[in-house]
Amino acid sequence: MTILENISLKPYNTFGIDAIAKQFVTANSFNDVKSILSLKKELFLLSGGSNMLLTKNIEKLVVHLNLKGITTSDIDENYVLVTAEAGENWHEFVLWCISKNYGGLENLSLIPGYVGSCPIQNIGAYGVEIKDTFYQLEALEIATGKTHIFNNSDCNFGYRNSVFKNNLKGKYIITKVTFKLTKQNHQLNISYGAIKSALENNQHPTLKDISDAVIAIRQSKLPDPKEIGNSGSFFKNPVIDTESFKKLQEKYPEMPHYIVSENEIKIPAGWLIEQSGFKGKRFGDAGIHKNQALVLVNYGNATGKEIHELAQHIQQTILQNFAIELEIEVNVI
């Protein structure tokens, strides 16, 4: 374990922002993480770098979590616990589970990032969220170096949210995550519009069929971070009260929406952004993707500050046009 100095973080974040880490270290094992904590330095945790926008250089010790490994433990003939180390690539982990016929994560195929960061964000897509299959996680408390176990209820999961984004933000290092998955009698979730359409001629879809459909849908709408810098969906889909929605629906009868509860309606943020004329627009090297207005992109040399300023411009415009406050999903550093 070697601490390096003045390292570019461009290869370590999917936006491709060229911020500098004053000090940088890679943790390849649990013992590495323990040793790093013993240094008693201020830490900046970095896994897949897929849900962050770097707007400045990092003065803290940047810790790149690279813990690898997958283990399983059968519960009974129907369920299995699958534990993945924090540094496992999320999409590759999902594909591994599908190859073993373990069900529950197939709708979350092709989401960028590492396993360790997925509970923080409660990542979700196409009708499924991490909380649906999450069993527990293991984490090291930064202040004490002690190991703690968090079960599903401990994490206080919400829409793209968890306790690790709120009360416990910056206080723990997640080292491994365990999921409870099905071995048979899989509960397939194919009701989401795009998946339903893709599988309309398939009466008995497999886990791989669903994963393949999700991958095709995502590839058709979302840019590959390896080709153009981005962090996927930049904004959360806003949830508004029913009365506010009715007023907007009078003006925009075609507005897509999803019922969350009796008094809450979710509006696609991408639709709001597209209706405001931003889709496909470019401002220097910062822009909005041509196929998905929810995705902000770096065409090459945009700074994090420039992308953040574009995001704020979009937020202000949506507020003026629709009286809706868009919340940024990506962590702005």
Image (cartoon, rainbow, N blue to C red):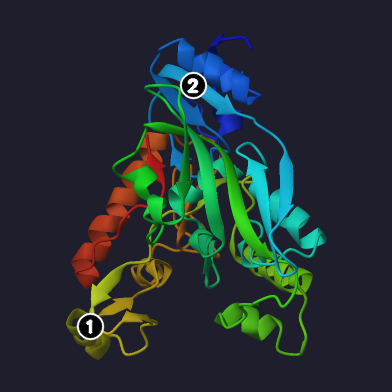
Q: For residue 48, which quarter of the picture?
A: top right
Q: Which residue is mark 1?
A: 242
Q: Is residue 192 left or right of residue 106?
A: left
Q: At which x and y percent is residue 78?
A: 71, 70
Residue depicted at x 61% and y 25%: 30
Q: Is residue 142 left or right of residue 226?
A: left
Check whether the beta carbons of the residues at disc 1 and disc 2 lie within 8 A of each other: no
- Pick the front one: 203 or 233: 203
| Gap in angstroms between the C-alphas marked 1 and 2 | 44 Å
Residue extending farthest to the right is: 99
Amino acid at pointer 2? Val
Q: How many marks?
A: 2
Q: At which x and y percent is residue 203?
A: 76, 90
Residue depicted at x 63% and y 64%: 218
- Pick the front one: 258 or 173: 173
Circle number at residue 104: none
Q: At which x and y percent is residue 332?
A: 37, 40
Q: Which residue is mark 2?
A: 62
Residue depicted at x 37% and y 31%: 171
- Report whether residue 271 is seen: yes
Q: For residue 100, which quarter of the picture?
A: bottom right
Q: Secondary structure at mark 1?
A: helix
Q: Secondary structure at mark 2?
A: strand
Which quarter of the rendering shows the C terminus? top left
Residue depicted at x 72% and y 43%: 70
- Pick the front one: 263 or 33: 33
Q: At which x and y percent is residue 236?
A: 38, 60
Amino acid at pointer 1? Thr
Mark 1 residue crowding within 10 angstroms, few (<14) / some (14–19) / many (20+):
some
Q: For residue 199, which quarter of the picture?
A: bottom right
Placement of 307 over or under 101, stated as above or below: above
